Amino acid sequence: MILTCRRCEFVFEYERPARQGNLPLRCADCRILHVRERLKRNREKPESREAQKQSRVARRSERKAWIDANRQRLSNYQAKRRAAKKGADTELVDALKVAERDGWVCYLCDNPVDPLVQRPDLMCRSIDHVIPLSKGGPHNYSNVRLAHLICNLRKLDSMPEEQIG
């Protein structure tokens, strides 16, 4: 496989079997220089264990804040990924559009869903796949319904005909 170095634009041949995502970005000489520079940078700024711990805690809190701010986006990504792994059809699904479409009524218990209730309350809104992703159901508007979180958790991955009314 013929590749081009990202640093010096030297064209080189890569002999190992190519696996997606594992191709080298630099030629052998530039890789050596890159590793040396990285080691030098790491030696120049030694951090104490306490500073490393504070940095870890800060990164963890930043990630948690991002997840809280982007819960719908993350949920969409995960569902789309699970459906794609099963080879099913995927589409970007907006939970608020589904809730409006379903009239804020849980399709499993036929009780209203309060739009103001947030996680971790078990009566908050959640999106349920009628045909579960684990059983090859698509992630699109025709296969999702509004449900209470507790109703969705009780349903698990059962098919509509397996549900007990």
Image (cartoon, grey):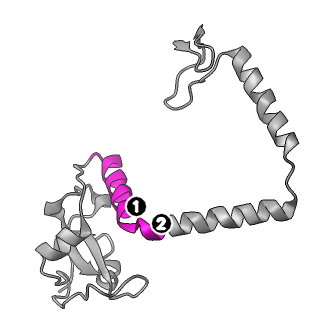
Name the residue carrying label 2. Answer: 67
Is 118 in front, or is 137?
A: 118
Quadrant for the C terminus, please.
Answer: bottom left
Residue 157 on the magenta segment = no
x then y, percent, for residue 119: 40, 82
The magenta stretch is 67-87
Residue under label 1: 74
Q: Position of residue 15 (x, y in %)?
A: 60, 13
Residue that appears at 59% across and 24% down: 25
- Disc assigned to residue 27: none
In this rendering, position of residue 2 left or right of residue 112? right
Q: Amino acid at mark 2?
A: Ile
Dominant SS in magenta: helix
Q: Is residue 110 above or below residue 94?
A: below
Residue 146 drawn above or below residue 66: below
> Residue placed at 30% from the left, 87% from the top?
116
Q: Amino acid at mark 1?
A: Leu
Q: Residues within 10 Å of mark 1 (few under 14, many from 20)?
A: some
**Circle 2 Cα neighbour tier, 10 Å, few/some/many (<14 / 14–19 / ≥20):** some
Tell me the SS state at disc 1: helix
Query: Marks 2/1: CA distance?
Result: 7 Å
